Amino acid sequence: MSDITTSRRSRITPEREAELYGAVLDLLREVGYDALTMDAVAARTRSSKATLYRQWGGKAELVVRALRNQKPGSMADVDTGSLRGDLYGIIGRGDDCAMAESAALMRALAMAVHQNDDLRQALRELLVEPEVEEFRRIVDRAVERGEVRADNPALDYIVHMLVGAFATRMLIDEKPPTREFLVSYIDAVVLPALGVASPD
């Protein structure tokens, strides 16, 4: 998808792109993924449907790129010199309001992901795989520094632990994920599983 996307897309201003992505996310919150249509996006943004298809190919890619655009910063910019600092840095990229919005958007997609192959593929290619790759670099640095043993079995599950805490916070506690909650989770669950000692 990525190579096709690169050759397909034409130039639009960053401001216009941000406006389009904002409208897509607003519609996603309002009606959910299944009821969100390219006609509705075109009407909301005063665009032609042909332009939207030319730029993004279809609804799945447009929605996932909108989700990626609203994420605050990149994990690639996080390098504090310690795994604890890097994990804190990752969750510190956005405030509690931004995390609550992200959680709400992911809930809006949860059922559709299981039923829509195009959406699942777009999520994996454009959002999940790049973020997992960046996260692996952070963990690899911790192994190279000697903070985490290379044979620690929890290394294979660290992404699952963090995503699980974020995704299930509302389901279990009926509260959105917050920085305070995730920091406490990192200290109580993730770092001990990796054998990282608590700070004195």
Image (cartoon, rainbow, N blue to C red):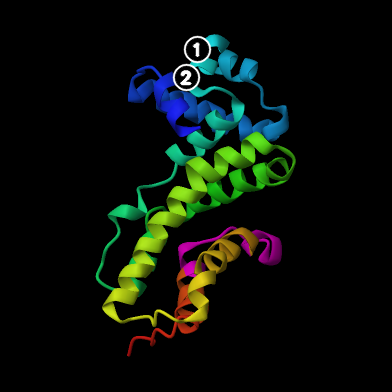
- In the rendered structure, the answer to whether residue 133 lies left or right of residue 30 reads left
- In the rendered structure, the answer to whether residue 20 lies left or right of residue 14 reads right
Which part of the image, by quadrant, shows the C terminus?
bottom left
Task: Based on the picture, tell me whether residue 155 belongs to the magenta stretch.
Answer: no
Q: Residue at x 54, y 70 (%)?
A: 157
The amino acid on which the numbered mark 2 sits, given as a three-letter code, is Gln
Residue 61 location (% of width, % of height): 54, 31
Label 2 environment density (alpha carbons within 10 Å; few <14, some 14–19, many ≥20): some
**In the orientation shown, which residue stands out farthest toward the left?**
81
Residue tagged 1: 51
User: Which sits in the foreground, 26 or 153?
Assistant: 153
| Chief SS of the magenta region | helix
**In the orientation shown, which residue stands out farthest toward the bottom?**
200
Q: Are marks 1 and 2 in contact (CB under 8 Å)?
A: yes
User: Which sits in the foreground, 38 or 40?
Assistant: 38
Label 2: state its secondary structure.
Answer: helix
Q: Residue at x 63, y 18 (%)?
A: 40
Q: Residue at x 51, y 32 (%)?
A: 1
- Whether residue 35 is situated above or below residue 139 in the rendered picture: above
Residue 137 location (% of width, % of height): 35, 62
Label 1: state its secondary structure.
Answer: helix
Residue tagged 2: 55
Q: Which residues are magenta?
A: 169-182
Label 1 environment density (alpha carbons within 10 Å; few <14, some 14–19, many ≥20): few
The amino acid on which the numbered mark 1 sits, given as a three-letter code, is Thr
Q: Can residue 162 be seen from the camera position used here? A: yes
Residue 68 location (% of width, % of height): 46, 40
Q: Can residue 47 be seen from the camera position used here? A: no
